[in-house]
Image: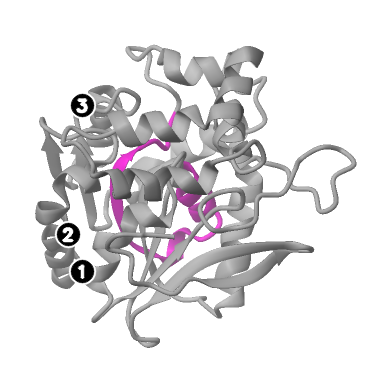
């Protein structure tokens, strides 16, 4: 398995009975802790440049959510053994379990991308006093903005049984994101690193379930958590916040960016007109040193 720029040795632990989570734990044990949370359809690979740029001084903890990356990919059928419920609440519980497993109970910096924003924000609802800083990259912590329509690529998986079948059968979402989620063309081996972990019907389960769990109304299970995170977001305005945003993102576009601008007016903001959803792929040479300077300064 070729993983360019990923010279790490992932660790594993049993996050739930019979289900193991893969994660990175890089850097000095006594360093300040930076937790990096990926979204869908990426995995800890998205954060590799930032881990390399910080881990000489900072302790970088980077999970692969269950069903993603190198973590186990259990089924969610009623009779499955082990069975996993692919919901936002499950993700929050998994993050909490990982940190307890590692004995992390002090201040942390949360760096988030895509679904990682919702997972981190929902976890922070019960741990607000432990958040020292935030790093947001193309993500959400509030409902779909009124100005933003649901992209067809997401609707295909969320609302269409045929679309869902194609996503799992042909790994369409991960392949599409690796091809079209950046403004610069990724090399074939980097695209393969993003996608091969989801090849096969069972391996792609979480890429679809994440879509199906997107909260759009009170009918959706994750909606109460989303309402709570939206209310809580302005309460972090007094903290150091760094925002890097690829404005060419077809999902988390300028409307989401403006939402964070309004909620966190004092944030250090870095929008990029020539970057897409995987903003750290397009702009890591700029963003990683900036985040390092931001952390060092605060």
Mark 1, residue position: 53
Disc number at residue 231? none
Percent x, y for residue 39? Answer: 44, 43
Residue 42 covered by magenta stretch? no
Q: Are marks 1 and 2 in contact (CB under 8 Å)?
A: yes
Residue 126 covered by magenta stretch? yes
- Residue 80 relative to residue 205: left or right: right
Q: Foreground residue, 187 or 154?
A: 187
Mark 3 and mark 1 lie on one chain; the one further toward the N terminus is 1
Residue under the point 32% across and 57% down: 47
Q: Residues within 10 Å of mark 2 (few under 14, many from 20)?
A: some
Q: Foreground residue, 59 or 230?
A: 59
Q: Residue furthest right?
A: 79
Mark 3, residue position: 248
Question: What whole-number distance in Å separates the C-alpha atoms at marks 1 and 2?
Answer: 6 Å
Residue under the point 23% across and 25% down: 254
Percent x, y for residue 64? Answer: 51, 57
Question: What whole-number distance in Å separates the C-alpha atoms at marks 3 and 1?
Answer: 25 Å
Q: Are marks 2 and 3 in contact (CB under 8 Å)?
A: no
Mark 2, residue position: 288
Q: Quadrant of residue 199?
A: top right
Residue under the point 32% across and 29% down: 252
Regarding mark 3 in the picture, which secondary structure is present there? loop
Q: Quadrant of the N terminus?
A: bottom left
């Amino acid at each position: 398995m070729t993983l360019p720029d990923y010279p790490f040795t992932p660790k594993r632990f049993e996050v739930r009975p019979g289900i193991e989570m893969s994660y990175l734990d890089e850097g000095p044990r006594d360093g300040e802790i930076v937790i990096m949370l990926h979204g869908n359809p990426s995995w800890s690979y998205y954060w590799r440049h930032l881990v390399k740029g910080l881990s000489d001084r900072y302790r970088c903890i980077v999970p692969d959510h269950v069903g993603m990356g190198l973590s186990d990919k259990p089924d969610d059928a009623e009779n499955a053994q082990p069975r996993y419920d692919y919901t936002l609440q499950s993700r929050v519980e998994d993050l909490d379990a990982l940190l307890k497993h590692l004995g992390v109970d002090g201040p942390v910096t949360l760096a988030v991308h895509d679904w990682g924003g919702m997972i981190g924000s929902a976890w922070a609802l019960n741990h607000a006093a432990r958040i020292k800083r935030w790093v947001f990259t193309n993500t959400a912590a509030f409902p779909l903005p009124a100005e933003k329509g649901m992209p067809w690529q997401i609707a295909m998986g969320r609302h269409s049984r045929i679309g869902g079948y194609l996503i799992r059968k042909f790994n369409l979402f991960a392949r599409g994101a690796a091809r079209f989620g950046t403004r610069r063309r990724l090399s074939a081996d980097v695209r393969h690193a993003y996608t091969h972990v989801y090849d096969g019907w069972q391996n792609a389960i979480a890429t679809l379930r994440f879509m199906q769990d997107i909260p759009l109304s009170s009918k959706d299970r994750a909606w109460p958590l989303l309402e709570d995170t939206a209310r809580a977001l302005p309460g972090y305005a007094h903290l150091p916040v760094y925002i890097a945003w690829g404005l060419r993102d077809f999902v988390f576009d300028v409307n989401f960016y403006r939402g964070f601008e309004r909620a966190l007016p004092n944030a250090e903001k870095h929008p990029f007109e020539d970057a897409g959803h995987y903003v750290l792929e397009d702009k890591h040479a700029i963003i990683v040193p900036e985040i390092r300077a931001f952390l060092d300064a605060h």
